Amino acid sequence: MDGMNVPAEYRKRPAEEVFLRVIDRRGGKGPKKVAEELRAPISLETARQEEVAAGIVSAVRARGDRALVEHTRRLDWPEADAGKLKVPAREIAAAHRKADKSFLSAVRKAAERVRSFHEKQLPRDWFDLGVPGAVLGQKFTPIERVGIHVPGKSAPLPSSLIMSVVPAQVAGVPEIVVVTPPGRDGKIHPAILAAAHELEVERLYRVGGAQAIAALAFGTRTIPRVDKIVGAGNIYVTLAKKMVYGEVGIDGLYGPSEVVILADETADPRLVAADLLAQAEHNTDSPVFMVTTERSLVKKVQAEIARQIKKIARAKVAGESLETYGGVAVTKDLEQAVAVVNELAAEHVQVMTREPLSLLSSIRNAGAIFLGETSPVPLGDYVIGPSHLLPTGRTARFSSGLGVMDFMKRSSVVYTSEQAVREHEQVVKSLAALEGLNAHVRAVEERLKRAKPRSARRKRNK
C-alpha cells in the first residue's frame, strides 16, 4: 500500500522539506500570544457562507419539502424526489446482508465499546429530605426525538453514525432520525446502511447539508421535526445548526478536526509525525500543532513528516493542511507548554512526555486527552469508547464532547409542606418586595391563609 495513489509532488519532495511554521516562545511571548500566532491562518471568511446557509434554511422553513428537494437536486442528487428521500427498510437490510463480515464485526466491536463507555455516564434521579417539610430532587428524562446528521460527502463515515446513535440509545431517546447526503445517483454508501441496520436505526433519510438541518428543525411533510440536532458536517451544516438553535437544541458547532501534541525530549519523532498526519489527512483546513520543550525535536519531526507523507493516499490533503494550518511552539519548560495547550483548547490533546499522567490535572481545556505514546487519537476516533464528536475551534474552553447528557433533560423536583412554606415565607417576601414582584408574595400568602394553625385544628377536634 505504501506510496499507492500518492501525488507525485509528495513522492519527490526532499526529506529536509519543512512543513510546519515554528514559533519560539523562549523569547518571552505569553501563551495567549503564541496560541494566537499558531491559529492565525484559521480565521475564515464566513460572510458568504452564512448568506448561502441562511437562504437555504429560510427556504425550507417556508416551503418545506419543495425547497428541500430543490436544494438536494442542486447540491447532491439531480433526480431527488420527496417520495424517495426516506430509505426503505429493505434497502438497509439488503446492504447489511451484502456487507463484508469483517466490517460488521468492526461495527459491533466499536458499538460495544462506545455503549460501555457511555453507560457509565447515565445519571440517576435523586431526592433529598434535608429541608424540614420538603422533598427536593432532580429527575432526568430522555429527549423525545433527536435528529442526527452523518457526514458523507467526501467519504462515508459509519464511525460518526456509531458515535452519535449509540449515546442517544444509551440515554433512552425513543425516536432517532438520521440524515446523510446521497451521491449523485441518490444512493447512500452501503457501509452507512449496513451500520444503520446493525444499530437498529429505522428512520434514515437521503438528504444532508443545511437543507437537512432546516428540515429537522422545522419539519416537513416527509421529515419529522425533532427536538435536538447533533452531528458534524461542513461549514454550511455548522452555520445552519447555529441558525436554528432556539427552535431546536444543538450539540455544538463543529469545525475541522484538530490536534495538539504536547511533547518533551522523550517523544518519538516518528510517532509525533504519524499522529500529526493522521489528523491532517481529514481536511485541507485541519489545524495540527505541536507544543514542545525540545527545539531539536522540531527538525526530526519535520523530516519524519516528509518521509511518511510519501506513504499516505491523502498526501495532498494532509500536505496542504500542514503547510497552511500546521505549527510548532517551542517553550522554555513544560509549565509554559501546558499553558499554551490550554490557550489552544483543542479537540484532541496528545501528551507525549516522560510522565504524561502527571500533567493530566494541569490540562484544563481539551475535548479528549490521550496520555502516552501508546494512545493514538485514531483509537478514540473509532473504537475505544468516547464519542469522537468533540469541541473544536477553542470551544473546549466551555464545552465537552458528545455524551449521554446531550440526549437528556434535567428537571428539578420540589414538594413543600405547609410547614416549609411558612418557614420560608419571610425570605420570599424580602426578595420579592425588593424586585417589585408582589404577586409572588401573594402566591405564598394564599397558601398560608388557606391553612389553619394547628392550635385551631386541635380546639376544633376537642
Image (cartoon, grey):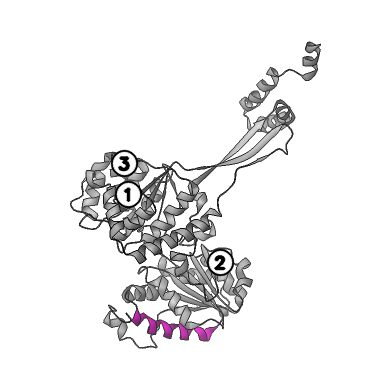
Is residue 149 or residue 443 the one in the foreground?
149
Q: Mark 1 and 2 residues: CB-CB less than 8 Å, in contact?
A: no
Residue 249, percent from left and from top: 44, 46
What is the spatial separation of the Cα atoms under label 1 and label 2, in whole angstroms?
39 Å
Which residues fall within the magenta stretch? 293-313
| Labels 1, 2: front one | 1
Residue 250 shown left or right of residue 455 in the figure: left
Q: What residue is pinned by disc 3?
A: 61
- Going by the numbered disc 3, the residue's amino acid type is Arg
Q: Secondary structure at mark 2?
A: helix
Give the mark, 1 or 3, whose residue is nearer the N terminus: 3
Residue 159 shown left or right of residue 395 in the figure: left
Q: What residue is pinned by disc 1?
A: 204
Q: What residue is pinned by disc 2?
A: 342
Residue 364, percent from left and from top: 58, 63
On residue 68, the disc is none
Q: Secondary structure at mark 3?
A: helix
Please determine whether, in this image, residue 79 is positioned above or below residue 336: above
